């Protein structure tokens, strides 16, 4: 039970000090789970992020659930997920009234404007973390798939599910499971 409480507390800290959503949380999750506690490897963390991105729901909750499961099974999932959402739930419950009351406040607006670049920085940090030493950056086929998918995402209005499906098909074709003619 003590280890489960440690999982809860770790994800509670991640939930408390992460602002900007799930992608902005990734550097915090990496720091706590991979670097500090060594509960999973960086490679496993990257795999979990990939799965969390593809499954329905917020990436922060999905990541916590998958990490918790990886390190302590179903109870680990429960404690990690509850940990990551507890602070947000309490904060939103309390703050809703005050945010609506002060939504026109110049101080609140200025603070929010100041936080936006920090969120972008956190998301870029997550991208760099996941890209650094990634096999995908050393493999020409993966670079081609990434380039095509990036192009499709920016130039079309295809649904993300179709993009993921298309990526899978390209992976099957490029990595030789289906012979190319």
Image (cartoon, rainbow, N blue to C red):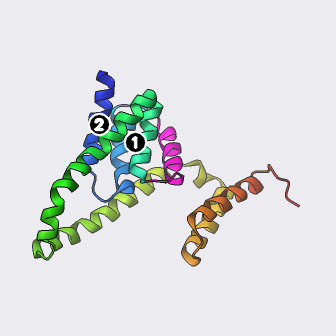
Residue 147 x, y percent position in the rendering: 61, 66
Displayed quadrant of residue 109: bottom left
Residue 133 seen in render: no
Residue 43 magenta-drawn? yes
Q: Earlier in the sequence, mark 2 or mark 1?
A: 2
Seen from the viewer's position, the closer of residues 83 and 98 is 98
Q: Which mark is residue 10?
A: 2
Looking at this view, name the residue that lies furthest to the top. Answer: 1
Disc 1: CA contacts within 10 A as few (<14), some (14-19) or many (>=20): many
> Range of the magenta residues?
41-57
Residue 72 x, y percent position in the rendering: 43, 27
Alpha carbon separation for disc pair 2 and 1: 10 Å
| Vertical arrangement, residue 20 with respect to residue 113, above or below | above
Displayed quadrant of residue 82: top left
Residue 21 seen in render: yes
The quarter of the rendered structure image containing the C terminus is bottom right
Seen from the viewer's position, the closer of residues 27 and 4 is 4
Q: Give the SS element for disc 2.
A: helix
Q: Do the residues bearing badges 2 and 1 touch, measured as CB atoms within 8 Å?
A: no
Write the residue at 47% across / 51% down: 130
| Vertical arrangement, residue 146 with respect to residue 2, above or below | below
Q: Give the SS element for disc 1.
A: helix
Disc 2: CA contacts within 10 A as few (<14), some (14-19) or many (>=20): many
Displayed quadrant of residue 153: bottom right
Looking at this view, name the residue that lies furthest to the right. Answer: 181
Write the residue at 43% across / 45% down: 63
Q: Which residue is mark 1?
A: 64
Write the residue at 21% across / 69% down: 112
Task: Give the dominant element type of the magenta stretch: helix, strand or loop.
Answer: helix
Q: Is residue 180 left or right of residue 99?
A: right
């Amino acid at each position: 039970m003590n280890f489960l409480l440690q999982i809860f507390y770790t994800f509670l800290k991640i939930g408390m000090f992460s602002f900007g959503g799930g992608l902005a949380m990734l550097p915090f999750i990496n720091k706590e789970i991979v670097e500090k506690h060594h509960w999973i490897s960086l490679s496993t963390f990257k795999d979990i992020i990939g799965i969390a991105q593809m499954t329905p729901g917020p990436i922060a909750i999905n990541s916590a659930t998958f990490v918790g499961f990886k390190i302590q099974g179903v109870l680990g999932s429960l404690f990690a997920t509850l940990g990551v959402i507890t602070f947000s739930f309490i904060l939103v419950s309390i703050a809703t009234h005050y945010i609506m009351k002060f939504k026109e406040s110049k101080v609140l607006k200025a603070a929010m404007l100041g936080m936006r670049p920090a969120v972008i920085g956190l998301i870029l940090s997550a991208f760099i973390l996941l890209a650094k030493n990634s096999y995908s950056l050393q493999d020409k086929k993966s670079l081609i798939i990434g380039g095509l998918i990036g192009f499709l995402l920016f130039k079309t209005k295809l649904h993300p599910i179709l993009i993921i499906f298309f990526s899978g098909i390209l992976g099957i074709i490029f990595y030789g499971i289906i012979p190319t003619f």
